[in-house]
Image (tube, helix red, strand yellow):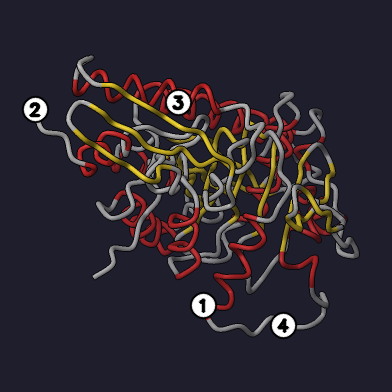
Amino acid sequence: MAVIPKTITDILRKVNFPGTTDNLIDLEMVQEIRTAGNRISFTLIFQREDDPNVQAVSEACATAIENTLGTDYDLLITPKASNRMKAPVLPGVKNIIAIASGKGGVGKSTVATNLAVAMAKTGAKVGLVDADIFGPSIPKMFGEEEAQPLMESIDGRDMIIPIEKYGVKMLSIGFFGNKDNALIWRGPVASNALKQLILQGQWGELDYLLIDLPPGTSDIHLTIVQTLSVTGSVIVTTPQDVALADVIKGVSMFRSKSIEVPVLGIVENMSWFTPEELPDNKYYIFGKDGGKDLARDLDIPFLGQIPIVMSIREGGDCGMPVAWSDETATGIAFKELAANVIEQLEYRNANLKPTERVRIKKS
């Protein structure tokens, strides 16, 4: 069987860098492919000489070639350190979760904040990115409006050290501007700022990285799925029909053939109102079980219901998320939500292949 360099490229395109969904060809790690008779040689580019993945990647390449072409070839793989290799995207992050909503005003950022805190309380390592570039609210919800993340040079790169509170590492564009001034950016500028926030963040090892997206669908959503391999999405809604109609659009976006990000489930926020003086009473002021019924109709897991109580608003305003307490009804609700999200993530990872980043085809 005649082997040409393209044959090797096609084989190694199926080999991912350890801990990522990025293959060696897209990372530009495979260089100088040569074939002659039964001889095959190529260079593997790593970012540094002491990269701990040198042996594992070399063996994975050899195994892939042997499984496809057989053992009748003399294979020479030469590891080399060079800055020509593209860095894998967030290799220390196990799961990336997009928190989305079809429309504004449904409490998406409140859910994202409290879900992150509740997940951290399980002992998991959690990060949170405020991707709502035009209306960042995460700094206020964590009581860190005056925080200014530090920069640190790591392996020759300037990295942003996330602010950490309640067990959650977080970054927001709100940390880098005047909180009283509106952010007026064109789409491409906003997208580039968000990419810098994510890729230059010194996240380290994380079990879960939550991305609090802007409401609706926009360039920011496309930037996220092009930049990151999003493990799954969580859709936040309220029970009334006007919110539910927009949920269908959001679900459709994530499920589309061009994106294909699994929808982990729907969260129904503001499910009922409970007065502080009447803790056993429930008033369904926005309708009853709208999100729950829609999840059933769309065949999507229903992750939980979050009531309207004064403590949620107060916690968001004073920078102490209600999920930090296990003693309140809302704290318990977010604890259950975190458990359900983790369960759906485990099911998704056991039954579906890793999500691929959306790639722009060059004409």
Q: Between disc 3 and disc 4, whose residue precedes?
A: 3
Report helix, strand or loop for mark 1.
helix
Distance between the alpha carbons at the discs numbered 3 and 4 = 50 Å
Distance Cα–Cα, label 1 vs label 2: 48 Å
Residue, disc 1: 188
* Amino acid type shown at disc 4: Ala
Q: State the SS at label 3.
A: helix
Give the residue number, with chain letter if any, for mark 3: 58
Of circles 1 and 3, the one toward us is 3
Q: Which residue is drawn at 49% across and 36% down?
A: 20
The C terminus lies in which quarter of the figure? bottom left
Q: Which of marks 3 and 2 is nearer the N terminus?
A: 2
**Neighbourhood count class around disc 3 (C-alpha, 10 Å): few under 14, some 14–19, many 20 upward:** some
Q: Which of marks 1 and 2 is in front?
A: 2
x%, y% of residue 3?
16, 34
Which one is in front in this view, the residue at disc 2 or the one at disc 4? 2
At label 1, the amino acid type is Pro
Farthest residue toward the left?
1
Disc 2: which residue: 1
Q: What's the residue at 34%, 29% (across, down)?
A: 352
Left or right: 283 as drawn, with respect to 267 = right
Sequence-first tag of 1 and 3: 3
Image quadrant containing the N terminus = top left
